[in-house]
Image (spheres, helix red, strand yellow):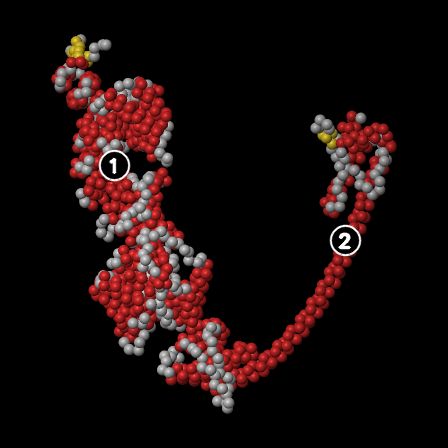
Amino acid sequence: MAKRVIEVPVGVNDVLEIDCESLPPHASEVCEIFKSEHSALHVYQALALEYYRQGNMDEAISALRHGVANAKVNDQTAKVPLLSHLASMYVQRARAAAHGNDRDVALQLATTLLNSAESISPNDAKTQLVRGMLALVQRRSEAALQHFQQAQRAGVRGVAALLGAARALYGRKQYAQALAAYQQALVLRPQARPDARIGIGMCLEQLGHTDDARRALARAAAVDPQAAAPHILLATIDLNAAKRAAAADPPQADEAALLLRAGMQRLRTAYALQPANAAVLLRLADRHAWLGDWATAQRLAERALRAADTMALTAEAQYQLARAHHGARRFDAAHDAYAGAVRINENHVLARFGLAQTLLQRADMSGAEAALQRVLDRHPACSEALRALGYLHARLPNTKAKALEYYERAMAALNDAQADAADADLFLEAAQLYEPTAARRAARAYRTAAGLLDKAGRPAAPELWNNIGALAHMAGDALAAEHAAYARAADLLADASEDAPTRVTLAYNTARFYERSGQWRRAVPLYRRVLRRAPSYVDALLRLAHIAVAVRGAPADALALVEQAKALDAHRAAALLLRGRIELQTRDVQNARRAFEHVLRDIDRHDQYALCALGNYYLEAARSDSGAKDSLRRAVEFFEKCLAVDASCAAAVHGAAIALAEDGLAADARRLFQDVRDAATAGLGPPMLAASADLVYRHAPPADAPHPAVVMPATDVILWASVNAAHALVDEANYPQAILAYEACLRRLRDHAAALAAQPPAADLPVPDVLPQAAEDTAADLDEAAGPPDAAQAVAKADHEVRLYLVRAMYLHAKAQKDAATMAAALDQMRSLCAAITYTLPAADADGDADGAEPAPMPSLTPDQALLLFDLALLEQSVAHLTSEQTPAERSVASVDSAIDALQHSTRLFTLLATWGNEQKRRKHKLLISATLADHRSSYGRSLMAKMARKREEQVEFERLRQASRDTWLQQQKDEERLREQQRVAAEDARRAEEERLLRETEEKNRMLRDKLASEHEALAAAAAAAPSAAASTSKPLGSKRKARAAAADEDDAMTSTNSKKYKSKAIISESEDEDDDDAKMDDDAGPDNRTASPAGTPAPAVTENQSDNGDVTTPKDMDSDN
């Protein structure tokens, strides 16, 4: 091998040879010689390259600096290569820098040198090449690609620019283009280093051509047996394939094991080739960390950290070291290592995520959130980071909504493949956050978690299925879903201890399910078994109390059970609230008020149920004769306090609206009622439980009652808000709109009734017993719960109430507008409402006290029935009154007769009610009607009867006269119609005669025109016949005769053409070639004397030019000459 020397010219003819194998330790010694001999700059560059080849980059940089410093002022171009080489060395130094500061300094120096080079030679190819290298180190793939392409265009030699462009394309994830560039570089220089085959293999792997990638990397390993990089990449491919095989569904264990062994063998081969290769050490550390061998992983990571020659490898080594510390639960060391990795490579997502985990361990919530947000900035769909942020916010105050947002994003980020292998804890944590506000979503998350646990071979705990059932109950889902959840939980508890606390909880929830599904005979004894196992289970006592009052109708028993619950827990608000509700139902309003006040004073001054209940209490008090204003003010205060606790509490808004209506502010109240209705329609407001019916406004206790009446049909918030809005419209005297609103409410109720009728009967859905039955569960216990109230009856009662409201609005509208038709419609509604009441009217002359008349039997009426009958009689009398006020044109005999019938019934009914009322008053019974007023109404009915009799006579006479007048008018109409028909027929006859006259005139004109045309044609024919005889009198040759005949024919043609244009009667006849030939032949045979003239009256044929076979035009003269 030839000796490597650097020749330095000395003097004129001498040369100094510097042996490259024995360079001095400091380049400055040689550079001083170069300076003294005024050597060319390329000698400095050669010296720097020799130092670089020997791995002494510092002296190489020193040699280049001396060359730049010794450059001649008048030859700056010569130092451009030195500046480019110097910049490239600083780029390499930046790539290998272990600390961020060193890297930044090196990059800044490289940038400065390149700027200097470009200022001298802007288009230098090597400068652009180094610019591309600098951009790659700075991770600016787009700029790097542009610089490498510019270097190629500038004519840089070698494949460096091509390899750089390929690397930039790979960084931009344009793998197909990068593959083409690597392949081109391989074709140009197969032995170039770095090996283009490695880049080809990496691109093929990214494009999904794994087998081709393996072959490319295997070829790279064969070409350079000492290279570790191909083996590392092959090992990475095998290990990733092993992970995919293990995660497949079903898992491919054999294939995964085979790939794992192959990958480890590749790593061992790479390790044997280069034991200090940081990439090999990091792969081995990752593998041992995956196996949980944290000590070995730590040792390998520390060795990799010492051997790393680039910042990327240093950052990865820090991360693997942090991972080993983290796995060994050395959190402080892990935190420091993660922080070191992030300092070196701020885009290292895994290191930043690990840093966030260690910050959470340190309870540094703000730092952890900032780190996780940085992860999301680069990977917005990272489910792990989203879940960690959800976990963090779930433990911070007032950030539960933010936590749910992150959990939802984490669940949404899982694709189909990831969802099957997702962590069940993600869905369990989300479900716990959903529970207070979104029962259905919580149940769905629990079900997903249970499914993931089943797939993983870890059956879900019975508590999970218990929660699913409870959430289905809270959400009002189908009974089958709740039953299935509790049954699954009971099955899982079959092998659990008899003393397991979950058994008691599940038994209570199962009893709640029985209660909801109407299985009262199962619910009551199960509650009692719960109390035997856990005597202090207050909720079970309260449920029994609720069943006692709501199902069995035993408020005394219910109050006794509530007292037992209070004895166990005197500060249980639910017990006092239930007691207040029971006392309200039994009309013990003062004790009910004290119970609600006790809750607010001693337990929870923000309890919404108690606040609304007291507001409703004062609303009722405001309707008394005294203290109305003060009671309304107190009611509003309580509703405002409730709204201060929860601005969306529909019950408080509803109560405030009633207070406004009672205070005369009907328009404001109506707007609030409509807001409640709209919120309920949109699903934004909570449900409300309606109180007892009343004819002004419906009260609505709050929805969050601790013991909702699950035995009753769900109260329709939209319905009663709409009813109260209609009440407000009535108070505003807007009766038409109120009528429409009531009718809409009735349609809603009928839809509800139809839905109830379509429901199947309550299913018999037993749940396996989790608490054994006892001998105390006797039949007497089972008989206590006879069954729930009929939901259809509740709907029918509500329908009855709303129809009463509708009748009242129609009555007021008819009275205000004097509209007898609307009053009659209200009467029809009222008759249907009273159809079920049985009573016997007194005789028609009962009021006259006729001798011997037997008194009518006293009817058995309730106060409510008497009130309905009074309203019926009032409507009948009002119909008669409005009919009597109508003009004869507005009514009919039939309507008057109907009004008289109604008035007779009304008068007798008022008489009956007056008698019944006096009797009830004598017995000191409570009355809802006035007997005196009924008697006055009866007297008024009798006087009105006489008036109606006169009105009927007037109506009969009016209709007789009106009918006579109508008959006269109809006869006049018929006469006028008959006259119009006669006039129409006469006009039609005249028109037809005129048309016939015009037709005759037209036909006569046409006949005269035809005669004129015929005479003209005869004249033309005579002229044509005279032409040949005139020609024969001259002695001219045959040719002259033909010409004369042609001229005559031309004249005939001209005349014919002229006449044709004038009359448009005949077309000119043109002879064909065959006819001309025949004429010519006939002339030859017969001679001129044998020609015949055209018949008289027939136009002579016109002679036209004819076309011969060869396309030439032939005239008759030519034909003669031919013959």
Three-letter code, disc 2: Asn
Front residue of 534 and 183:
534
Mark 1 — residue?
A: 350
Q: Quadrant of residue 1083?
A: top right
Front residue of 1038 and 1074:
1074
Dots 1, 2 in contact, CB < 8 A: no
Percent of width and height locating residue 516: 36, 58
Percent of width and height locating residue 912: 45, 82
Q: Secondary structure at mark 2?
A: helix
Q: Residue at x 77, y 52 (%)?
A: 1009
Q: Secondary structure at mark 1?
A: helix
Q: Residue at x 80, y 39 (%)?
A: 1100
| 134 displayed left or right of 919 | left
Task: Return the mark for residue 1006.
Answer: 2
Most extreme residue toward the top, as rendered? 13
Percent of width and height locating residue 945: 50, 84
Q: Quadrant of residue 207?
A: top left
Q: Residue at x 21, y 10 (%)?
A: 3
Looking at the image, tell me whether mark 1 or mark 2 is earlier in sequence order. 1
| Between marks 1 and 2 in the image, the one whose residue lies nearer the viewer | 1
Quarter of the picture holding the N terminus:
top left
